[in-house]
Image: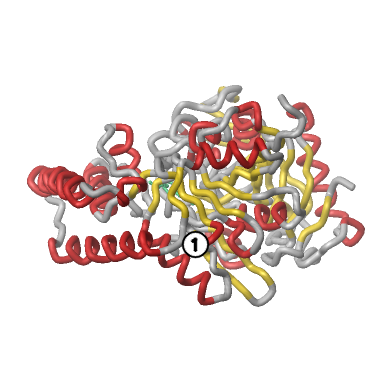
Amino acid sequence: MNNNKGFIDALVGLQWGDEGKGKNIDELLSHGTYHGVARFQGGANAGHTLKHDDISFIGHIIPSGCLQKDIELYVGNGVVVDVVSLIKEITELKNIGFDVTPRLFISNRAKLVSYMHPFLDQAEEHYRSKGNAKIGTTAKGIGPAYADAKARRILLIGDILSIDFMEKEQNLKEFHMNLLDMYKKNYGFEYSLEKIEEARKRWLDSINELKKLEIKICDLSYLINQRLNAGKNILAEGAQGIMLDVDFGDYPNVTSSNTLPANICLGLGVSHTYLRNIYGVIKAYTTKVGGGDFPARITDENLEKLFQKAGNEFGATTGRPRMCGWLDLFALRYAIQLSGVNKIFINKADICLSERVKVVTEYKKGEETLQEFPLYLNQVTSVITEEIPGWGNANFGVKEKKDVSKELASYLKYIENKLEDLDVSIVSVGTGPNREYSFNWKD
Ligand code: IMP
């Protein structure tokens, strides 16, 4: 490859989402290495919280570089765009002094989430609940939107600029109404036409607003390739986490997109030859929200509640409490292997709520210790754990390695040893929500 060209680094979550990726993206962008940051999958199911001194912002569609005024923001073709959320975020950012419109670029091939998709999401959950197998989606219409995309009937963001947009919208609405009626007739799903009309109005208003703004709806693949050719570097921002990947997670308790870095090329329209570092983010413990099994879950309810409280483990998108578990090294090794991560950020390492901390090292199916990640997590009957001393609350806000308590330092060394054969290193450790609350582990 021409050495004057730029490169793409990526940052992905290695657990079940909610690893605190927004903070790490923000930190990486502050080094001056990157020209822009790109979302390549997912939609408004994501929620990244950014804190800069006294400013706090929760983004769902707009990439996490929004609080850094010289960073371009890209929304790739692999994203399912909720326009209502997008306009709301743009307005909120403007109100706190960040007009992102001149530096926001959306792929004309990105998928347009319809106002009908959240209703269909609810209808599908209703249908699943009959068999007691709810996924516990974020109800943002993600599954139905990706299903429409694969079935080749979804509207694209570029369609909002075409003269037959309203006709296409009407046709798709008819199709969706037929589906809702099927769910009503066959499975007793109730919906309100009034609510649909309200949602449609909000949606059309947001689309009109989007057309008026200065945002570039463009061939984003062309634009990003131009930037790379000009020697500019891009950071790709993963949403959700590897364990929620539609192909490699605990199907069907997954999201509907590929969260793996392999999807960066397809979700942005770039060649794999540009990929350089893949950063992975974990929390010092694990959380999961939604349906399905969670082998590393803390069995002591009171302790789990303490983690929820101390870690503010409530969904940024839905407000749902997250299940809390110990660090799951078995799942983590699987996620690292799938994603090719070579550098790890560990967040919320200041949070330790018991004298001894457990770590899951193996999954068992009956008497068998599993070598491969199981097809379904409900096949796991028990886990093997190791225990190491906890580190209390002494590490909140630590900014330098020399100030870390010896117990936390040995926890970090323990993790490094366990992952040694995978060629990954821990680069930075978070000790609080603010961007400056972290320290470099590798000097
Ligand atoms: P969906 O993506 O809304 O369809 O939800 C599918 C599954 O992924 C559910 O278990 C959600 O709780 C989970 N999920 C989706 N997005 C996120 C996220 O950003 N963080 C954590 N879990 C998520």
Residue 311 as seen in the image, left or right of residue 396: left
Q: Position of residue 142 (x, y in %)?
A: 36, 47
Question: In percent of the image, x 58 and y 32: which residue is there?
Answer: 363
Q: Depth check: 158 or 321 in front?
A: 158
- Residue 349 position by quadrant: bottom right
Q: Which residue is mark 1?
A: 316
Residue 239 as seen in the image, left or right of residue 398: left
Residue 177 is at least partly visible in this image: yes
Q: In which quadrant will I find the N terminus?
A: top right
Residue at disc 1, CB closer than 8 Å to ligand 1: yes
306 in relation to 426, above or below: below
Q: Position of residue 320 (x, y in %)?
A: 44, 61
Question: Given the current orientation, which residue lies at the most extreme left position?
Answer: 185
Residue 298 is at least partly visible in this image: no
312 in relation to 218, above or below: below
Question: Given the current orientation, which residue lies at the most extreme right position?
Answer: 402
Question: In percent of the image, x 55 and y 68: which residue is there?
Answer: 57
Question: In percent of the image, x 61 and y 32: which residue is there?
Answer: 339
42 in relation to 51, above or below: above
Q: Name the secondary structure under disc 1.
A: loop
Q: Position of residue 44 (x, y in %)?
A: 42, 54
Q: Position of residue 423 (x, y in %)?
A: 77, 30
Q: Depth check: 288 or 231 in front?
A: 231
Q: Mark 1 is on which residue type?
A: Ala
Q: Depth check: 111 or 104 in front?
A: 104
- Residue 276 position by quadrant: top right
Residue 261 as seen in the image, left or right of residue 33: left
- Residue 191 position by quadrant: bottom left
Residue 349 as seen in the image, left or right of residue 133: right
